[in-house]
Image (cartoon, rainbow, N blue to C red):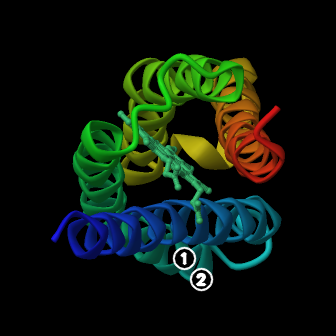
């Protein structure tokens, strides 16, 4: 029974982090395109931003799947004393903190500036939001890559 449940949890875990990583990468690529379009084609830029916003619920679903299945895996495979897993948990915490304190907050600010068209001015505040969102996406992708490397090598 346990190996079967383990495989179910692992399938959910893999599905969860594929959704998370996939959406994060798609968000980042679309975000870069958005800044290219802002001064070239405002309609398209707004449309692109709407597409990115529609991905948000999937991030929640992916995150929930990863965490719930991760906890289930941990009860069946007690790897919490191993170094790779401890390092992985530090990275998971950084990922969550980034999610709470940087990404969505900056995205919300950006959307407010898009609604008021202030984003077209590209002033210091907008440049700051752009910089912080860039940092958010790059750090989230690097954290996930590091988790994948840790999970593969398991040193
Ligand atoms: C962004 C978050 C996470 C990512 C990207 C991630 C990624 C991975 C990867 C790539 C594996 C290896 C899968 C395999 O063996 O084929 C794995 C295994 C595992 N994960 Fe996660 N994980 C995340 C969060 C979590 C959390 C929050 C927990 C627990 C609270 C957790 C618990 C586990 C356990 C126990 C295993 C070991 C399964 C085994 O030994 O085969 N993970 N994870």
Q: Residue at x 53, y 70 (%)?
A: 18
Q: Is residue 48 left or right of residue 19?
A: right
Q: Quadrant of residue 88 in the image? A: top right
* Spot occupied by residue 87 in the image (x, y as percentages of width and height): 67, 20
- Against 89, is 120 above or below? below
Instruction: Kindly give the residue lying farthest to the left in the view shown.
Output: 1
* Spot occupied by residue 118 in the image (x, y as percentages of width and height): 53, 41
Q: Nearer the viewer, residue 155 or 70?
A: 155
Q: Residue at x 59, y 44 (%)?
A: 119
Quadrant containing the N terminus is: bottom left
**Disc 2: CA contacts within 10 A as few (<14), some (14-19) or many (>=20):** some
Residue 44: which disc?
A: 2
Q: Secondary structure at mark 2?
A: helix
Residues under numbered marks 2 and 1 in contact, where contact means CB atoms less than 8 Å apart: yes
Q: Nearer the viewer, residue 127 or 147?
A: 147
Q: Is residue 132 left or right of residue 102?
A: right
**Disc 1: CA contacts within 10 A as few (<14), some (14-19) or many (>=20):** some
Task: Identify the residue position indicated by label 1 in the image.
Answer: 48
Q: Secondary structure at mark 1?
A: helix
Q: Is residue 51 left or right of residue 131?
A: left
* Spot occupied by residue 43 in the image (x, y as percentages of width and height): 54, 80
- Against 95, is 38 above or below? below
Q: Quadrant of residue 6 in the image? A: bottom left
Q: Residue at x 30, y 69 (%)?
A: 3
Question: Is the residue indicated by label 2 positioned so its CB lies within 8 Å of ligand 1?
Answer: no
- Against 33, is 17 above or below? above
Q: Give the Cα distance between marks 2 and 1.
A: 6 Å
Instruction: Kindly give the residue lying farthest to the front in the view shown.
Output: 1
Q: Nearer the viewer, residue 4 or 42?
A: 4
Quadrant containing the C terminus is: top right
* Disc 2 versus disc 1: nearer the observer: 1
């Amino acid at each position: 029974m346990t190996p079967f449940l383990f495989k179910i949890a692992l399938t959910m875990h893999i599905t969860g982090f594929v959704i998370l990583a996939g959406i994060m990468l798609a968000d980042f690529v679309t975000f870069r395109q958005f800044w290219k379009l802002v001064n070239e084609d405002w309609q398209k830029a707004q449309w692109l931003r709407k597409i990115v916003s529609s991905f948000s619920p999937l991030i929640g679903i992916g995150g929930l799947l990863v965490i719930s299945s991760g906890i289930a895996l941990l009860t069946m495979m007690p790897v919490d004393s191993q170094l790779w897993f401890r390092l992985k948990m530090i990275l998971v915490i950084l990922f969550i903190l980034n999610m709470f304190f940087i990404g969505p907050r900056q995205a919300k600010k950006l959307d407010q500036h898009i609604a008021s068209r202030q984003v077209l001015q590209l002033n210091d505040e907008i440049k700051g939001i752009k910089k912080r969102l860039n940092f958010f996406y790059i750090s989230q992708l690097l954290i996930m890559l590091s988790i994948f490397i840790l999970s593969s090598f398991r040193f």
